[in-house]
């Protein structure tokens, strides 16, 4: 998978940033050139500013470029996102002139988060989502036709969405002209890293997406403590999913809260150190998924590197043959190693990717996890195969199935796939949140775990309703349909309960609104543990 950084040399030249970029050996930049700065007189293309000639500063360095073209030009359509035939033709000519001028540009991304409100304007922004797709494809076609005449080697990609909105992308790809798109650009900011396989897998359920290369032209983190791990985990997951390109956003500090690779003083952040480590040890290697269970993520790079993370459990390695590194490339002590869900461990050495690897995962009592096992059921089925829970809606004692909603299928819904119902627009369930906007009395979203054998269990669940909630939520815990406890609050709710079940019996957690559903979006996690497993021997 190609690896790059999202720079902003088109917004202001910085020689210090250039030097830091070359020192980090960033192999690819994703950036832009503004049309209005190049074509100031109709039909004349002049590259005479640092913000329009910046690719020249990387000529001969081996740095490739993914160029994003998005904004309009005051000479056409009053500077709005191009939409008229005249403006679209002019946009195509500008794209062709730019690629003819800069040979290191090998990928052209048309548009930027076209499904949102921040990077489109004029009639394109005012249009409904279906028409937004039509306008976008017209830009892609105009660029592809013009560029193909001068640089047929360049890949023209589009879609260019924030998040992974299948409800926006699938109809777009059914439109005439979609064949002009040679790849799909995505910015999965709203998808937790561990949910990327489920969401990308669902998105690829559409025939055309299945055949299109995916380009993650923006991927980043807002958490300075986790950014390095997010970069390694994200790179690992996306590479294993067969993604073509991942560009970390941002390359350099922007002041927008996203963690850059390079600070203003030119020094590397923790994410920058992780980027350097990935460059040196992982990039270019074949990767395969060797995860042993739904709660543990393990990926083999080549024959001597493995990247692992997941639910807490001990990890032991052979100290004679294996070394362990953190996401920044620092050595990790081999004493009392333990997996964590947000920390990547990189194992190198003989046998770490063999069928009998030279590392061993310790005992884990985890039986079911609402986050790790969240998935999208196949059409006509109520439960995904790998899900440890039955997830459904209950109204007045009647169980009703949830269906997969593709995401951004209309306004005011999540921009990623989720579980809901077409007759209850505000109802939603994701891996991390749920909104129990239920029509009818005694309504709740239910997670039910059924025992495969006689078991002593421990159920741990947390619920944190939004501070915008009018009157909070109610949580009910039941064994075989009989209530064990009920708690209602606007403050976070935690349940930690031991339960004995016979084979076939169940424990269920139901989340319901109180009088009002306003603001009731709730972050949640439900886990079921084997209470007797992993106890120390006496």
Image: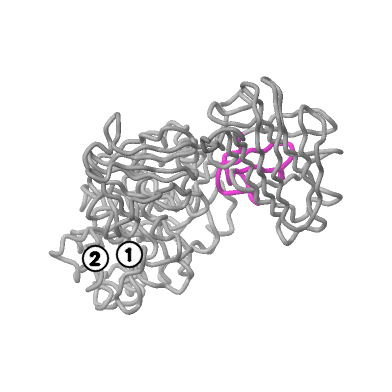
Q: Which mark is residue 272?
A: 1
**Tag 2's secondary structure?**
helix
- Crowding near the residue tagged with mark 1, few <14, some 14–19, many ≥20 C-alpha atoms within 10 Å: many
Left or right: 451, with 103 as reference point: right
The percent position of residue 126, horizontal first and vertical second, equals: 59, 59
In space, the residues marked 2 and 1 are separated at their CA atoms by: 8 Å
Task: Name the residue at 25% across, 39% down.
Answer: 286
Residue toward you, 225 or 264 = 225
Q: Is residue 344 above or below residue 250?
A: above
Which residues are drawn in magenta?
Answer: 404-430
Observer-nearest residue: 183 or 151?
A: 183
Query: Where residue 479 sits in the image (x, y, percent)?
Result: 76, 31
> Please, which residue is most extreme toward the front here?
538
The residue that label 2 is drawn on is 24
Question: With 49 as the anchor, is 415 left or right in this view?
Answer: right
Locate residue 203, reporting x and y percent.
Answer: 48, 38
């Amino acid at each position: 998978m190609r690896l790059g950084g999202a720079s902003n040399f088109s917004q202001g030249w910085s020689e210090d940033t250039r030097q830091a970029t070359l020192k980090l050996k960033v192999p690819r930049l994703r950036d832009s050139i503004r049309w209005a700065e190049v074509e100031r007189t109709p039909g004349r293309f002049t590259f005479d500013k640092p913000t329009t000639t910046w690719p020249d500063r990387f000529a001969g360095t081996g740095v490739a470029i993914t160029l994003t073209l998005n904004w309009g030009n005051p000479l056409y359509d009053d500077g709005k996102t191009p939409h008229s035939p005249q403006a679209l033709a002019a946009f195509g000519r500008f794209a062709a002139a730019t690629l003819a001028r800069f040979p290191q540009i090998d990928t052209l991304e048309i548009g930027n988060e076209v499904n949102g409100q921040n990077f489109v304007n004029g009639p394109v922004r005012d249009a409904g989502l279906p028409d937004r797709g039509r306008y976008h494809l017209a830009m892609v076609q105009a660029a592809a036709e013009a560029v193909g005449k001068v640089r047929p080697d360049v890949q023209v990609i589009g879609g260019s969405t924030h998040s992974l909105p299948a409800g926006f992308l699938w109809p777009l790809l059914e439109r005439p002209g979609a064949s002009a798109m040679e790849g799909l650009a995505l910015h999965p900011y709203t998808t937790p890293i561990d949910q990327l396989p489920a969401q990308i897998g669902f998105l690829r359920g559409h025939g055309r997406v299945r055949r299109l290369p995916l380009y993650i032209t923006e991927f980043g983190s807002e958490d300075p403590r986790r950014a390095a791990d997010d970069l390694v985990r994200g790179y690992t997951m996306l590479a294993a999913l067969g993604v073509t390109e991942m560009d970390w956003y941002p390359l350099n500090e922007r002041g927008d809260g996203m963690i850059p690779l390079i600070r203003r003083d030119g020094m590397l952040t923790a994410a920058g150190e992780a980027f350097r480590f990935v460059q040196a040890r992982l990039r270019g290697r074949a990767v395969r998924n060797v995860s042993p269970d739904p709660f543990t993520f393990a990926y083999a790079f080549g024959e001597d590197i493995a990247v692992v993370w997941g639910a807490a459990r001990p990890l032991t390695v052979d100290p004679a043959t294996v070394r362990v590194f953190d996401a920044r490339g620092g050595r990790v002590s081999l004493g009392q190693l333990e997996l964590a869900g947000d920390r990547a461990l990189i194992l190198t050495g003989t046998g770490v990717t063999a069928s009998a690897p030279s590392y061993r995962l310790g005992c884990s009592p985890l039986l079911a996890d609402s986050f790790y096992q969240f998935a999208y059921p196949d059409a006509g089925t109520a439960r995904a195969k790998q899900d440890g829970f039955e997830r459904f809606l209950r109204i007045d004692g009647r169980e009703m199935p949830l269906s997969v909603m593709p995401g951004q299928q209309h306004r005011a819904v999540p921009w990623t796939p989720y579980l809901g119902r077409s007759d209850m627009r505000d109802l939603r369930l994701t891996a991390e949140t749920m909104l129990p906007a239920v029509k009818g009395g005694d309504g709740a979203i239910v997670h039910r775990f059924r025992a495969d054998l006689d078991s002593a269990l421990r159920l741990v669940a947390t619920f944190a309703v939004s501070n915008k909630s009018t009157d909070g939520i109610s949580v009910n815990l039941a064994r075989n349909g009989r209530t064990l406890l009920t708690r209602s609050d606007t403050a976070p709710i935690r349940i930690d309960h031991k339960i004995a079940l016979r084979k076939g019996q169940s424990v269920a957690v139901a989340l319901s609104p109180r009088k009002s559903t306003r603001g009731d979006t709730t972050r949640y996690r439900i886990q079921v543990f084997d209470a007797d497993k992993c106890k120390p021997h006496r």
